[in-house]
Amino acid sequence: MKKHLTLLMLILCINVYSQNVVQKELKGRWKMQKNENFNNTDINFGEFLKFNDNEINFFKIESGKEEEESIKKITFIYDFGNQHYNNDRCQLIKFENGEVWELTLRLINNETRLIWELKMDKNGSFIILADDRGVIKNPELRKKALEGEINTYYIKIK
């Protein structure tokens, strides 16, 4: 019993540590590279975003100055749908309107991408994306389908 408790505590500590690492990596300024228009969200993605503790500032830059578009309060969450969520490159966030988004950090083409994926809409409905490219035989149509599956993402700016 003592071994199980020790193992459980170790797993919980590793999860909290990895989530804190992701939260630290999220801090800073990000520039939008692709915006997929989501029909079931109230979030207006800005050209740029900045994480500050428990809020996200969406803004644009005009004449070298930041012009604030919106500030959204968020909560970092660690469990989702009665399942403990553990991924060292992802972070779940919940907005005030109830939407839950998964933020994933990935290194693609030598750039760090912050990929947004809606997991639960404001009505509490879970969102599941299906990958149906496997049935497409034509390489050109398959590539076009892949481009349509790339979610909204930002790249980190220095």
Image (tube, grey):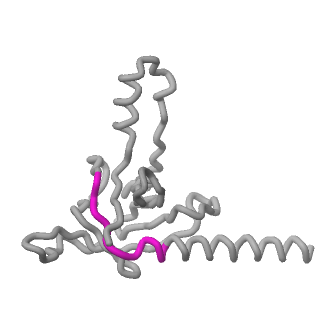
> Residue, x 28% and y 69% (percent of image)?
49
* Coordinates of residue 113 in the picture (x, y in percent): 40, 58
> Residue, x 60% and y 71% (percent of image)?
18
> Does the magenta portion include 144?
no
> Residue, x 46% and y 72% (percent of image)?
25
* Coordinates of residue 59 in the picture (x, y in percent): 20, 70
Vertical order, 90 against 68 (above or below) = above
* Coordinates of residue 129 in the picture (x, y in percent): 46, 41
Left/right placement of residue 44 relative to residue 132 reads left
Vertical order, 105 against 64 (above or below) = above
Q: Which residues are magenta?
A: 23-33
> Residue, x 29% and y 47% (percent of image)?
36
Left/right placement of residue 29 relative to residue 75 reads left
Left/right placement of residue 138 relative to residue 42 reads right
Quadrant in which the N terminus appears: bottom right
Quadrant in which the C terminus appears: bottom left
Q: In this view, which residue lies farthest toward the left? A: 63
Q: In this view, which residue lies farthest toward the top? A: 137
The answer to which of 5 and 28 lies nearer the viewer is 28
